[in-house]
Every structure is written in C-alpha cells, then in structure tokens.
Image (spheres, rainbow, N blue to C red):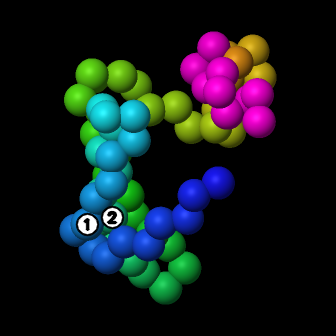
Amino acid sequence: MKVLSRCVSESFVIDDHIVVTVKAIKKEMVVLSLESLRNEFPYREETITLNQMEQVLPEALKR
C-alpha cells in the first residue's frame, strides 16, 4: 500500500491514465476528482460484486 499526501489542486497519476486531483479538504472529508484519459468508468468498490472486481481489479485481489 502506498500513502500519498497532496494539497488542494495537486494531482497524482495511476497507471499512466487515471489522474486523481484533490479538489477540497474539509473537516472530515476529502473531495477528489478522477479523470481517466482512456474514458473508462471509475468503479466504486462498494457497488460492484466480487466477480466484477476480479475482472476490474485482478492485481489488487491477488495480494
């Protein structure tokens, strides 16, 4: 697991195509912007089944 710290308006890139930008930091909430350069839909972990996760996130499930 990697832990990154970013300030508002700072970004980081995942797998050369997903850009995550910190939009706001509030008392108990962080607002993020996700942009996929490949026009892929970002999945919310709690809304997909385990079978779907195996297709979407195969490397994460192998750990």
Secondary structure mostly taken by the magenta-highlighted segment of the chain = helix
Q: Of the two numbered discs 1 and 2 on the same chain, state the one appearing first in sequence.
A: 1
Q: Badge 1 local density, few (<14 within 10 Å), some, or many (20+)?
A: few
Dividing the picture into quarters, in which one does residue 41 lie? top left
Q: Is residue 61 magenta?
A: yes
Q: Alpha-carbon distance for marks 1 and 2?
A: 6 Å
Q: Is residue 26 left or right of residue 56?
A: left
Circles 1, 2 touching at the beta carbon (< 8 Å): yes
Q: Which residue is mark 1?
A: 10
**Residue at 30% from the left image edge and 32% from the top image edge:** 17
Amino acid of disc 1? Glu
Residue 30 drawn at (x, y percent): 45, 69
Q: Is residue 47 magenta?
A: no
Which label sits in the foreground, 1 or 2? 1
Residue 49 coordinates in the image, percent (x, y): 73, 23
Report which residue position mark 2 lands on. Answer: 22
Describe the element under mark 2 as helix, strand or loop: strand
Q: Residues within 10 Å of mark 2 (few under 14, many from 20)?
A: some
Residue at image location 56% in from the left, 37% down from the top? 44
**Magenta residues, as a range?**
55-63
